[in-house]
Image (cartoon, grey):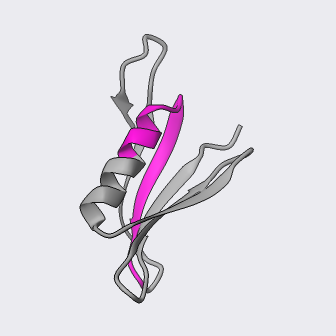
Amino acid sequence: MDMPLLSVSETKDGIWSVNERGPSRVAIAYFPSKWGAMKHAVRVALAKPRCRVAVVERNGNVRLSREYDQGDDGHNVEI
């Protein structure tokens, strides 16, 4: 099974978006601030068994990323 990816990026007009791509879901959400977008992305990632969050620069380069794995005991394990 493919791991869902949440990418956080800023649009040309300064709005922040969170794009979710996974094996059975594609979604997008918009936020006025980076903080709001990051909080949303982490909240969604923690609700999934496994997920990757990436902050993407305007030129398409990944600035940073983190994988979340809820482990067998339900606790978050950084990969």
Please name whichever residue, 57 or 9, is drawn nearer the observer in this view of the structure: 9
Please name whichever residue, 41 or 63, is drawn nearer the observer in this view of the structure: 41
Q: Residue at x 28, y 66 (%)?
A: 34
How many marks the image carries: the answer is 0
Q: Residue at x 39, y 37 (%)?
A: 79
Residue 23: where, in percent of width, then height? 72, 46
- Residue 38 as seen in the image, left or right of residue 50: left
Please name whichever residue, 11 or 23, is drawn nearer the observer in this view of the structure: 11
- On screen, 3 above or below 59? above
Please name whichever residue, 48 or 27, is drawn nearer the observer in this view of the structure: 27
Q: Residue at x 28, y 68 (%)?
A: 33
- On screen, 28 above or below 70? below
Residue 77: where, in percent of width, then height? 36, 28
Task: Kindly give the residue lying farthest to the top in the view shown.
Answer: 73
Classify residue 71 by image quadrant.
top left
Task: Kindly give the residue lying farthest to the right in the view shown.
Answer: 24
The residues colored magenta run 42-58
Task: Kindly give the residue lying farthest to the left in the view shown.
Answer: 35
- Residue 75 as seen in the image, left or right of residue 30: left
Q: Quadrant of the N terminus?
A: top right
Residue 67: where, in percent of width, then height? 42, 43
Residue 24: where, in percent of width, then height? 74, 44
Q: Residue at x 30, y 57 (%)?
A: 36
- On screen, 59 above or below 2? below
Does 41 lie within the magenta span?
Answer: no
